[in-house]
Amino acid sequence: MRTFVLIHGTWHGGWAWKEVIGHLSAKGHCAYAPTLAGHGPDETRSGVTHDDCVNSVVSCIRQGGLDNVILVGHSFGGTVVQRAAEEIGDRIARTVFLDALVLNRNESVVEILPTVFLNSLQPRNNGGQSATNSTNSSEFAVPPWETWRDNFMQDAIQEHAWLMWEQLAPEPAQVNLDKLDLSRFYTLNNIVPKSYIYCRQDRAMPPGYFHPGMSSRLGGCEVVEMDGSHEVMFTRPAELAEKLIEASSD
């Protein structure tokens, strides 16, 4: 039996892993999916830092008495994996990055986001629908529906993509602006085993961004590939559960 702690990405919450947790549990594994600080429809986002997000994960693991954890990060969650591993590396058996961001030392998330990606998050001029179109400087708005449908979850039927899009919530802005030192992570990087799961049809970022772009930042790591879009936890939860198990194997 393995113990997974699953860290969600931007605009998501722990709810995003519900089906994956079900498939992992059916195979005899334990899985937890904390919601990061400042994430969720009714949460306060002003003043929430990247460290606050990390503390959400560290608290989940410490308070749950969890050890030998497979720490999984999706998208933005990859940066939280990096910092959480620094804080509780003695409790981590392996880190797994699912089409995730991987920061170098003293970088912030916003520094490594491609311009084409940032442009895709802007409200459409043709009357396209946007979930928030927030002008609040303390948060990043949910992407326009058309971007979500075409770039994030294009392998789902429209009704399913819409249902998931409606559950997204704005992202605390500061978590993307904080620079992370990560010196301890890159020391641990040679000690704690790591894997990268690459989704072949991911359109959220330009080709090559996640793999080999982000995956190569980890140095030597096991790369596991699967079909699917950026949101495989919604579109291929059973297959993703299998890949998580594969990626966590010695």
Image (cartoon, helix red, strand yellow):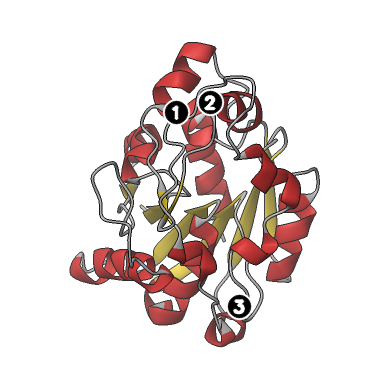
Q: Is residue 21 visible?
A: no
SS for tag 1? helix
Q: Nearer the viewer, mark 3 or mark 2?
A: 2
Q: Nearer the viewer, residue 177 or 125?
A: 125
Residue at x-position 44% and y-position 61%: 71
Q: Nearer the viewer, residue 249 or 160?
A: 160
- On the image, numbered disc 1 is attached to which residue? 165
Give residue 122's position: percent from left, percent from top: 60, 39
Image-based side of 230 in relation to 57, left or right? right
Q: Is residue 74 depicted above or below 228 in this figure?
A: below
The image quarter in which residue 113 lies: bottom right
Tag 1 and tag 2, C-beta contact below 8 Å: yes
Q: Nearer the viewer, mark 1 or mark 2?
A: 2
- On the image, numbered disc 2 is attached to which residue? 145
SS for tag 2? helix
Dot 1 or dot 3: first in sequence order is 1
